[in-house]
Amino acid sequence: MPLRVGHMLLLAALMLWGAALGRDGFDRWVAATPMPASLIPETSVQVLARDGSLLRAFTVADGRWRMAVSAEGVDPGYIAMLLAYEDRRFRSHNGVDGRAMLRASWQALRSGGIVSGGSTLTMQVARLIEDGPTGQWRGKLRQIRLALALERRLSKAQILDLYLHHAPFGGNLEGVRAATLAYLGKEPRRLTPAEAALMVALPQSPELRRPDRHPARAGAARDRVLGRTAEAGVIAPEVLGAALAAPVPDARAPFPALAPHLAERLLRDHPERATHHTTIDAGLQRQLEVLARAAIDGRGDRVTAAIIVADHRTGEILARVGSADYTDEGRQGFVDMTRAVRSPGSALKPLVYAMAFDDGLAHPETLIEDRPTRFGNYSPQNFDRQFRGTVRLRAALQLSLNIPVVALTDALGPVRVMAALRRAGAAPVLPGRAAPGLAIALGGVGVTLEGLVALYAGLADGGQAQPLHDMPQAAPQQRARLVSPEAAWHVADILADAPPPPGAPANRLAYKTGTSYGYRDGWAIGYDGAHVAGVWIGRADGTPVPGVFGGDVAAPVLFEVFSRLKPLLDRLPPPPPSTLMVSTAGLPPPLQRFSPRGAALGPPADAPKVAFPPDGAEVETGGAPLVVRVAEGQAPFTWLADGLPVARGMRQREATLDLGGPGFYNLSVIDAEGRAAQVRVRLR
């Protein structure tokens, strides 16, 4: 008589012996069963997309894939097949099915070998969680005792969940979810009858039936499960034929590895979490990772790319591509270039223009000089070394001219521009302890792609800073005001009129490009009415890349990003009701032409000053108009509130302004020579 037949007879006798002990003695024997230190299995850390799909997973400490799963997350057909094939009375027995063991023993005696097993699902769980032997009678007895103890401590659902986690599927795969991801390339929520039967069959002999190594054996085992479950009525006869004809997978698919830089950061920053929820759109992330690889094709061995897409209405990051290829060591693909500090080139210019509009220093139709100009010891040049003479600010921004934006920065003050960058969440970095200078307008400051996208998200969302996040937030963050809605709209209108790159659709995408000094970084940032995206192309080590211009290499990729994001752009918002939309001739005289106001010499002593209210003041008006006064300067004076004229041609130094109600206001006064002063006040 074969050894295993003897074991089954012995086990049947042991069941009878247990009954003879009496209930109290038997219960004491079961209660004293040594239990594993923890019945909660260690599962792979997983990073999930916004819809709950898997972005990335990590093996457990011993290198195995064991994915968190429950019966609710598994196809009911698989559960029905599993119980019909492995343990028909699972719902009713106490851990050991005496009838099944006696049947198996009798079948073994008649046939001289194993026909069916006597182990219950609970006994299999007992063996799996203690990883004990199955061939020796002592091991089988220990499993029986542990199975009985498990049934007293856990519910049937908990025992089934343990099986779903621990069942072996060959190699380093444990649990049904790891198996379906590896062999079927899908979650176990929906399985065909053929797929479910394969998952039932593999744990019986996981190494000999591995589909990637022994597909024929796996198919034969699957077909036996299909036949027996069809006899039990689990699957219909008409389904059986199609299931038997279904091909068996013969390769193992890689586990999802989307957004690897983000996944690694979450694992590092929150090692205590088993599951990380993100705002990432898995489908978009997958498309943009492919796009990033295509963007660097033919551009050199060390060139890489990074992309961020966010919803500027909520701040949610929908896609984050840290490099063109995470595994490419030659390109230093492991470096997350969405968070690397680099020079933005001209990409900061829209903020400077918006601040100038907001301060009443200029308007899109204001004329400005693009001529050789010296600011102290600083003599900026245009990128092409040419000068256009007198141009409108609208054209100066679209052409990305350097002289005008430096003149505006000088009038605003570099410290104020840096403060605005910080409010926007751009986190600007200056070398060492250097003070901010005029060169920040041309890229003389370090920012990240994430910070730059956050800046444009604020401009896109009406001038309010929009903090970006890639994990769901319990409550919205407080948002700072960058510029007025009117100034933000003017910038968007200018950027949307810029010509698109060759071959790209003329779709009113508000965008700006940038190229850092020495051709180290190519940038393109853009937005429509709902989304903002940024593209960076360069080398992770910061060395120059000849020929990398933001307009030539990054802008086409930006337009491709939006084409993958949605078929049509969301319209940019209409202008706020108080937006000043006139030609140059229709502007107040001080706004018709911008003057650098003695950039090299500093402001003259007789420049206008707001005598009342002082900067930062809170003024109680009780709903009445605000009385303002100007000192110094040359009449007539023009007063502006948030960039809009509210009093023109005022020859008196005192004026009464009807601002419309309580709130914060940027008040500016401009004298006859174009010199200006500004304060920020709050009316109550």
Image (spheres, grey):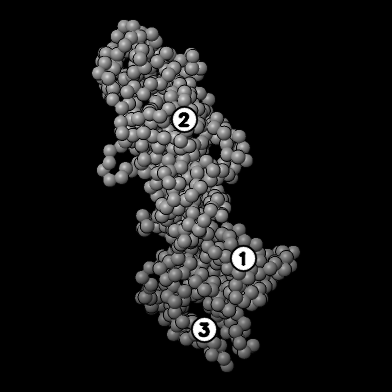
Q: Please, what is the three-letter code of the amino acid marked with disc 2? A: Phe
Q: What residue is drawn where x is 45% and y is 53%?
A: 539
Please tell me whether mark 1 or mark 3 is closer to you in this view. Answer: 1
Which numbered disc flags the more N-terminal residue, 3 or 2? 3
Please tell me whether mark 3 or mark 2 is closer to you in this view. Answer: 2
Q: Name the secondary structure under disc 1.
A: helix
| Location of the N terminus (image quadrant) | bottom right
Q: Position of residue 53 (x, y in %)?
A: 53, 54
Q: Please, what is the three-letter code of the amino acid marked with disc 1? A: Ala
Q: What separation in Å lies between label 1 and label 3 (alpha carbons)?
A: 32 Å
Mark 3, residue position: 12
Q: Position of residue 280 (x, y in %)?
A: 49, 48
Q: Please, what is the three-letter code of the amino acid marked with disc 3? A: Ala
Tell me the crowding category of disc 3: few under 14, some 14 to 19, or many 20 or more residues within 10 angstroms, Cα based: many
Which numbered disc flags the more N-terminal residue, 1 or 3? 3
Q: Position of residue 583 (x, y in %)?
A: 51, 17
Where 453 sits versus 210, above or below?
Answer: above
In-image side of 450 versus 197 (left or right): left
Extreme residue in the bottom direction? 1
| Location of the C terminus (image quadrant) | top left
Tell me the crowding category of disc 1: few under 14, some 14 to 19, or many 20 or more residues within 10 angstroms, Cα based: many
Extreme residue in the top direction? 652
Q: Name the secondary structure under disc 3.
A: helix
Which numbered disc flags the more N-terminal residue, 1 or 2? 1
Where 575 sits versus 255, above or below?
Answer: above
Mark 2, residue position: 387
Q: How many marks?
A: 3
